[in-house]
Amino acid sequence: MAPVSATAQENYPSKPVRIVIGFPPGGAADTIARIYGDALSKELKQTVIVDNRPGAGTTIAADYVAKSQPDGYTLYIGGASLMGGDNALYKNLRYTDADFLPVTQLTTAPLLLVAGKASGIKSTADLLKKAQQQPGALNYSSSGNGVITHLAGVHFAKLANVSMTHVPYKGGAQSGQAVAANDAQLSFATPASVQPLIDAGKLTPIAVTSAKRSSAMPAYPTIAESGVPGYDLSNWYGLFVPKNTPTAIVQRLFSASAKVLREPAVQKQLAGRGEEAAPSTSPDAFRAFAVREGKLDVELIAQSGAKID
């Protein structure tokens, strides 16, 4: 690929910018991308397009961006899986995290531990007691093998020294319904996927998975404060660009992102969907964070035994 000229860097962006995500329209990542993209478009004074490329987890989208021209016009929104988890889960991927440059974290949101009414579980203490008394008897549902809603249960079981049985489903909606129907007794779910079932009285919200209470869900305690010290797992998204993208363009995107993520209107839109704006202090700080999160992701995948051919 030809290097980006100094003039092109100075005039960036001079044409529409594309944000690629590995999720279909309507989900959390898509919503975040559109809120962020709209605000970024105004800040950059240029059209920003969200390009949904779901499939094979998020690897089709990531592979596309990894092979794109490193000129700042093809961006990627992803999470911890990009930083090693994809390669731990899928065989023969044609990219690694080294093919990307981290720009900034965008958002963070805890998962919500929920239990079915029939389970009798109303607190983390209840869950721990049942899991200790009946090793392996409790089923926890997830939205698929190797994804964060699966790995959250793996992390919980390890730190709490209990045994639970994982039951994967095709997506968060099915996972939540399984708990409501008592096919599974609990789930570490994205808040949006289970809120309708909570509102309908079919699920009991127990605790959030982050180290600190969530400003979006302040009424719920953390798992860490409820009996499992050190538990901390959140679903975050960040901005990445292909490797060899000029530093000037990375810095332009970082500065623009930092500005829009501090806008009250953007923060309010994100909070309405259970997300918190979480801009990094620098691209290097985001890199360090993403690397740490990626290592945890790889460790949890190894502990889970999950593999996808």
Image: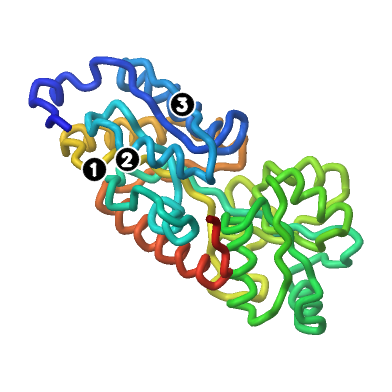
Q: Residues within 10 Å of mark 3 (few under 14, many from 20)?
A: many
- Tag 1: amino acid: Lys
Q: Is residue 265 visible?
A: no
The figure's colour scheme reads rainbow
Q: Is residue 62 visible?
A: yes
Residue at 73 percent of width and 61 percent of height: 167
**Image quarter (top left, top right, bottom left or bottom right) of the N terminus:** top left
Rendering coords of residue 293 (x, y %) = 42, 60
Q: Residues within 10 Å of mark 1 (few under 14, many from 20)?
A: some
Q: What residue is pinned by disc 3?
A: 51
Label of residue 102 in the image: none
In which image quadrant can residue 292 be found?
A: bottom left
The earlier-in-sequence mark between 3 and 2 is: 3
Rendering coords of residue 218 (x, y %) = 64, 52
- Tag 2: amino acid: Ala
Rendering coords of residue 168 (x, y %) = 70, 57
- Tag 3: amino acid: Asp
The earlier-in-sequence mark between 2 and 1 is: 2
Q: What residue is pinned by disc 1?
A: 243
Q: Residues within 10 Å of mark 2 (few under 14, many from 20)?
A: many
The CA span between labels 2 and 1 is 8 Å
- Where disc 1 sits, the SS reads loop
**Left/right of residue 55 with respect to residue 73 in the rendered view:** right
The CA span between labels 3 and 2 is 15 Å
Above/below status of 81 relative to 302: above
Q: What residue is pinned by disc 2?
A: 66
Residue at 30 percent of width and 21 percent of height: 44
The CA span between labels 1 and 3 is 20 Å
Question: Is there CB contact under 8 Å for labels 3 and 2?
Answer: no
Residue at 53 percent of width and 44 percent of height: 56
Rendering coords of residue 305 (x, y %) = 57, 69
